[in-house]
Amino acid sequence: MRSRPFYEGRGYDPATGIFTASVAGLYMFTVQYCPFPASMVYLEITHEGKPLQRSYHYEKVYGVCVSMQTFAKVAMGEKVWVRSIYSGDLYHQEGYMWNSFAGFLVHL
């Protein structure tokens, strides 16, 4: 049985992939992505349209997962999301490899 994702603060909108801060504070954001072999992927974590962290990956033979993380001071109502600068194919196979975007409040 598949459980539903847990969104404690309800700031993440799974329909858009955008996190909106319900309280101001220091947040940590993390991304995991799993490109297909021979697929180039270039992503960034974006805060109000400005890049916080970028990650590029190309693996010729193997399917691997890559992660990146960053910290940011985010004001109430500001938005954070993952933007693709260039993206080949990503895995999206339930039970095998997951792509994810997560964030949590570290300090008010």
Image: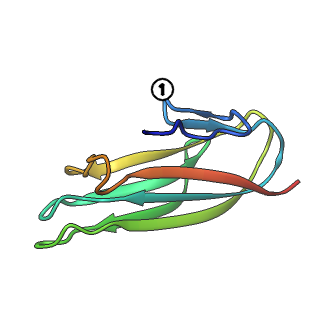
Report the side of 55 relative to 9 (left or right): left
Residue receiving disc 1: 15
Query: Residue at point 75% right, 33% down?
Result: 77
Q: Which residue is drawn at 55% across and 42% down?
A: 49
Q: In which quarter of the image is the N terminus?
A: top left
Above or below residue 40? Residue 76 is above
Residue 32, horizontal then vertical, whole percent: 43, 59
- Viewer-nearest residue: 42 or 97: 97
Residue at image location 16% in from the left, 72% down from the top: 62
Give residue 6's quadrant in the image: top right
Question: As displayed, is residue 84 above or below residue 1?
Answer: below
Q: Which residue is drawn at 38% across and 52% down?
A: 99
Q: In which quarter of the image is residue 36?
A: bottom left
Kindly state the secondary structure of the residue where label 1 is placed: loop
| Residue placed most toward the observer, 49 or 58 | 58
Number of numbered discs visible in the structure rendering: 1
Image spot of residue 59 (x, y percent): 19, 71
Q: How crowded is mark 1: few (under 14 residues within 10 Å), some or many (20 or more)?
A: few
The extreme front residue here reads 1
Give, as a three-letter code, the residue at label 1: Ala
Taking the image as shown, residue 84 lies to the left or right of residue 18, namely left
